[in-house]
């Protein structure tokens, strides 16, 4: 049996951005460190998830395709002059 349990890291990202600015580190470095710590805490609490099958929408290999799709749809609407 497979179940989906979404974890939204977006609220964590806003805090991380402010923290990175405060300590003078790059947001990507701080974000990776805090994300790793978050997942470690979940594991310590006994959560049993298959971490090999996670979808992280904040990673470039995901959002580059959503951005590409958005641009293609925008161009199609712009060129045809039609509204969706």
Image (cartoon, grey):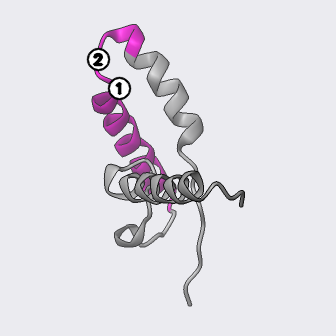
Residue 58 % position (x, y): 43, 47
The residue drawn where x is 44% and y is 63% is 55
Mark linked to residue 16: none
The residue drawn where x is 35% and y is 10% is 23
Residue 20 % position (x, y): 38, 18
Mark linked to residue 27: 1
Looking at the image, residue 58 sits to the left or right of residue 5; the answer is left
Q: Quadrant of residue 14?
A: top right
| On-image quarter of the N terminus | bottom right
Instruction: Tell me: residue 84, above or below residue 38.
Output: below
The residue drawn where x is 59% and y is 79% is 3
Residue 35 % position (x, y): 40, 42
The residue drawn where x is 64% and y is 54% is 81
| On-image quarter of the C terminus | bottom right
Mark linked to residue 25: 2
Instruction: Tell me: residue 38, above or below residue 3.
Output: above
Query: Magenta span covers which residues?
Result: 21-46
How many numbered marks are there? 2
Q: Which of 15 and 39 is in front in this view?
A: 15
Q: Residue furthest bottom?
A: 1
Q: In which quarter of the image is residue 51?
A: bottom left
The main secondary structure of the magenta stretch is: helix
Whether the residues at callouts 1 and 2 have beta carbons within 8 Å, the answer is: yes
Q: Which residue lies furthest to the right in this view?
A: 83
Instruction: Tell me: residue 49, above or below residue 12.
Output: below
Looking at the image, residue 25 sits to the left or right of residue 71; the answer is left
- Marks 1 and 2, how far apart in space? 6 Å
24 in the magenta segment? yes
Residue 34 % position (x, y): 39, 35
Q: What element carries label 1?
A: helix
């Amino acid at each position: 049996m497979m179940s989906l349990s979404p974890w939204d890291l977006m609220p964590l990202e806003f805090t991380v951005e402010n923290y990175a600015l405060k300590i003078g580190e790059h947001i990507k470095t701080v974000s990776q460190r805090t994300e790793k710590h978050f997942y470690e805490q979940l594991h310590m609490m006994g959560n049993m998830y298959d971490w090999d099958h996670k979808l992280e929408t904040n990673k470039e290999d995901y959002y580059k395709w959503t951005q590409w799709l958005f641009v293609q749809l925008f161009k199609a609407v712009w060129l045809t002059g039609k509204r969706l």
